[in-house]
Amino acid sequence: MKRTSRVPDLAETEKAAPEVQARAPRTRRYHVGQQEIIQGDCLRILKRMKPESVDLVVTSPPYNIGLGYRSYQDRRAEDDYLDWMVGVAAAVRRVLRPDGSFFLNIAGTSAEPWLPFELVVRLRALFALQNHISWVKSIAVPGDSFGHFKPVNSGRYLNRNHEHLFHLTLHGDVQLNRLAAGVPFKDKSNIARRGHAQDQRCRGDTWFVPYETVRDREQKFNHPGTFPVQLPELCIRLHGRPDPVVLDPFMGTGTTLLAAHRTGARGIGIEIDPDYVTIARRRLKDAAVS
């Protein structure tokens, strides 16, 4: 039997997080070059955006694992969190173009590993899972290791060295520019022998993107959940549209907008916390003059 599912109505999904809406600050807008920052609650702002106006979405929402955000309590009942995230995804679907891509970065914990999978299963009502990318943050090879290993003091669990990057599209048929996010051939004889036009091959679905080494939270802009600029940059390049409009509804300190700036894209970042907005504006201004 064919599986059918109902796309949630936006009016329904707005009810998912009333405590967030109740304290949502007044919307403010800032522009730095081609990048637009909107301070406010993402569900309210997404509802006001023009339908089918965004080429791709790259975002890393709160993981519901108790991180110390300034303006958001990152620990709610699991069903409440999942309902809220489905509401955000429904709002994203409305603003995404028919050939758009939604790159969702999320992770669980050793003690609570199921949450990312629970979420992506619920999102089957809204999207097709076109690609599942493993973002490898650190890796061990014989006699050596690369990247940042976050210590885990446990006799039961292994160090968690990767996160999920779900590539969601409306129907699973979006054409990508795989070589724009590719890597050079290791064996150069493959270029001519297999008739490739350039020294570039598909990166595949495991992306080793390490963090730059930091020694304290200040170097991470006092944000508990940053990701490297290269990660959203690869997503933008992979989607492969010229002059795209890139949206991050959980902008944080502006990393996705920095990636948009680097790639010549127009970025829209939504963030509820005014302190993170200030940091994002400063980072973009610094990037514009560097």
Image (spheres, grey):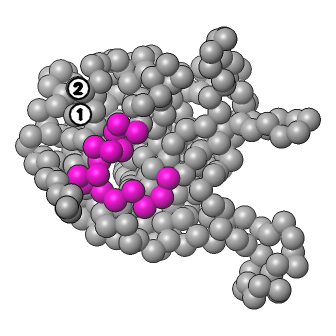
Badge 1 vs badge 2, beta-carbon distance below 8 Å: yes
Residue drawn at point x = 25 percent, y = 54 percent: 126
Residue drawn at point x = 38 percent, y = 72 percent: 173
Q: Secondary structure at mark 2?
A: helix
Residue position for label 2: 80
- Can residue 287 be seen in this snapshot? no
User: In the picture shown, does residue 206 fall above or below 40?
Assistant: below
The magenta span reads 117-132
* Residue 89 image position (x, y, % from top left): 27, 46
Residue position for label 1: 84
* Residue 75 image position (x, y, % from top left): 34, 17
Residue 195, numbered circle: none
Residue drawn at point x = 34 percent, y = 70 percent: 99
The amino acid at mark 1 is Trp
Say which quarter of the image contains residue 266: bottom left
Say which quarter of the image contains residue 197: bottom right
